[in-house]
Image: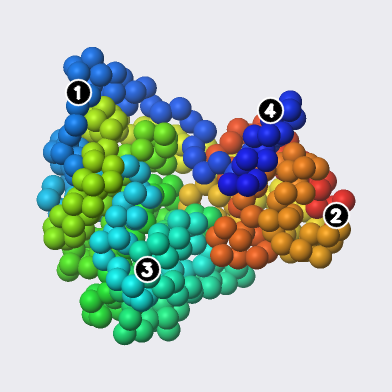
Amino acid sequence: MKVAADADKLRAEGVDVVDFGAGEPDFPTPDNIKQAAVRALEANLTKYTAASGIMQLKKAICESHAKDFGTDYKPNECIVTVGAKHAIFNITQAVLNPGDEVVIPTPYWVTFKDVVNFAGGSCVFVPTDEAKGFELTAAMIEAALTPRTKLVIINSPCNPSGAIVERDEFEKIFQLTSERGIYLLTDECYGKFLYDSEPFSIASMPGAKETVLVVNALSKTYSMTGWRVGYALAPAALITAMTKLQSHSTSNPTSFAQWAGVEALRGPQDSVAAMLAEYRRRRAFVIERLRAIPGVTCAEPRGAFYAYPNLKVLLGKNGMQTMLQVSERMLAEAHVAVVPGEAFGTTEHVRISYASSMENLKKGLDRLHEFVVKNS
């Protein structure tokens, strides 16, 4: 947040800043989705809805998940939320008691740690190995489980690393958690953006509905970040608890945004494939350019739209002791905004979003290259 604020300040001063920090697609929301919202507005569908979302959207979510992954969720096992972050917050509030442990692989998405802490839970981090592409295995998860473990959170593809959990390992993790009665939260926000494997949901496993908690959003898949439409699929009793909480916090998600969500899920899906093809092209360019910088390494992302390069070559140089300091200097001197790895639980990396035009990627990576060479 500090880097973003500093970047905005520089822009206000007329500085040309290349922003690699944005965690959102640079594509417009598809027109059919926007027009669905317009129709909802014209039909005066602007009043309160049920706290858990309109039935039409809950049905569309269940049908879409069933079509994609072979699951069989019903509307009473679905809640529509104000983005996926809201769904995760509601889950942690509903299931965690003070002292409950939550297993989270590192690097992790920034919100996981804070919502667990807010609920009174205790984070148990599982470091992954950059040399192995930040690979996560069931054995790594098993070593972190204790009698106090209440929840395991898996984000695949991962923000920030782009790593994925292989299907056989995910199935083993599910066996570990289900046998112990531990909830397994699968964050599927980038599930449609995979480069070398087919989309998969652990919720399709037999018996998964008892302990698997699915979280997703329309934000990334349909370039609807500002619409704030997310959802969770979970046991009906948990959905009821989350709905009670939601009714006293946000009430319902925005009415006309929900109708746009119905169109997103039931309408043409061409835009998803088009975005993935462009991300694949950008990924190849970004990884090649990063690996050409002396002293910089970068595991190849297998999903999402982030690169997570290791910039330890800069640590200890010219007063830079942390990645936050590296990021601040990079912004001030090279006018490139990145997110420091401390936000994701690591100390040698920065996150670069390649949800940006090729022109910006080229310009920003030229500047980054020059900055590293100058300071290392």
Contact, mark 2 vs mark 1 (Cβ under 8 Å): no
Distance CA(mark 3)–CA(mark 2) = 42 Å
Query: Where's residue 175, x and y in %?
Result: 27, 76
In this picture the colour scheme is rainbow
Dot 2: within a 10 Å radius of its alpha carbon, few (fewer than 14), some, or many (20 or more) residues?
few
Q: Residue 83's image quarter?
A: top left
Residue named by callout 4:
12
Q: Earlier in the sequence, mark 2 or mark 1?
A: 1
Distance CA(mark 2)–CA(mark 4) = 27 Å
Depth check: give the residue in front, 204 or 82.
82
Q: What kind of element bears circle 4?
A: helix
Depth check: give the residue in front, 309 or 299.
309
Rendered image: mark on residue 45: 1
Query: Where's residue 280, x and y in %?
Result: 53, 44
Query: Where's residue 134, x and y in %?
Result: 54, 67
Left or right: where 7 falls relative to 205: right
- The residue lying at 22 percent from left, 68 percent from top is 211
Rendered image: mark on residue 120: 3
Dot 1: within a 10 Å radius of its alpha carbon, few (fewer than 14), some, or many (20 or more) residues?
some
Residue named by callout 2:
375
- The residue lying at 25 percent from left, 80 percent from top is 180
Q: Earlier in the sequence, mark 3 or mark 2?
A: 3
Q: What kind of element bears circle 3?
A: loop
Distance CA(mark 1)–CA(mark 4) = 38 Å
- The residue lying at 12 percent from left, 50 percent from top is 76
Mark whose residue sits in front, 3 or 1 = 3
